[in-house]
Amino acid sequence: MALKITEETVRAIIKKRPEISHKGTFGTLQLFCGSKNMTGAPYLAASGALRCGVGLLYISATGRLKRILQSGLAEPVFCGMKISPRATAFVVGCGSGKKAKYVKMILSQSKPAVIDADAITWLSKHKKHLFKKRCETVLTPHEAEMSRLTGRDISYISQNRELCAAEAAKEFNSVVVLKGHETVIAFPSGETLINTTGNSGLAKGGSGDVLAGMTGSLLAQGYSPEDSATVAVWLHGKAADELASDISKHGLLPSEIPYAAAKIFAWFE
């Protein structure tokens, strides 16, 4: 039976940030996200990552996408489409479109990665790369992406969320975050968790991009894939709950989640 993620669960995982530290202490995350018509996705993923404490953020972007992101993001380092040797974790897929093929390159190296959105869709047609991967992975599908990845009908997945997440985690040797109401997190070990936070205000485009960035940030800081997913999912939902109380479920925006999540970290410091 799946356990529920609570504030106490998260409190037991989050580490204290040492006062004697520098940006290298908290890892380097590299994003392979965004495309011509999806410029918001890397912005949201970057915001989620930075507000969750990563020391350095690299964004792989070129041309127009790079110029657009540079106008709105002051903190990241922008680089080309090759893996940086400084990266300690990766996020790939958020709004990537055809560029999601870069997931193949990321799976061939040894550092952990969050695989989201278009990268999951790409892998659904090239599953051999999941079976050959060298790195630990966190897959973050919604039900339609899970359907593409597993071949199961969406209706079946909707009615058997825990089972489908657990089967996928075992098959692909990955942590699987099946997003939706009461998000399910499944580990390759067979353990499953049910999230207790979040609300319908998260049912907006961009919420998943923020979650991917948050998860990647924790991975880059040295948290395990299991702990990164657990903390990020709970924190993402809790931030939405705080925003719903302050604004409304109708009116909260994905772009507001990173700042709300950052404030919740104060509970654990």
Image (cartoon, rainbow, N blue to C red):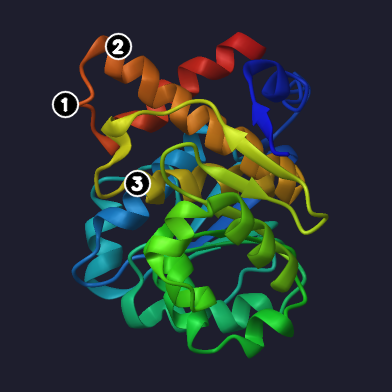
Q: In the displayed structure, does residue 213 sit left or right of residue 133? A: left
Q: Relative to 178, does residue 244 appear above or below in the rendering?
A: above
| Label 2: which secondary element | helix
Residue 159 in the image: state x and y as whole percent: 46, 53
Nearest to viewer (mark 2 / mark 3): 2
State which tag comes first along the sequence, 3 or 1: 3
The residue drawn where x is 47% and y is 60% is 157
Mark pair 3, 1: CA separation: 17 Å
Q: Give the crowd class for mark 2: few <14, some 14-19, many >=20 residues within 10 Å.
A: few
Amino acid under disc 2: Ser
Which residue is denoted by mark 1 in the rendering?
251
Q: In the displayed structure, does residue 21 sit left or right of residue 258? A: right
- The answer to whether any part of residue 77 appears in the image is no
The front one of 192 and 262 is 192
Quarter-wise, where is residue 96 in the image? bottom left
Amino acid under disc 3: Leu
Quarter-wise, where is residue 11 in the image? top right
Which residue is denoted by mark 2 in the rendering?
245
The residue drawn where x is 26% and y is 67% is 65
| Label 3: which secondary element | helix
Residue 43 in the image: state x and y as whole percent: 33, 50
The front one of 269 and 77 is 269
- The answer to whether any part of residue 135 appears in the image is yes
Q: Give the crowd class for mark 1: few <14, some 14-19, many >=20 residues within 10 Å.
A: few
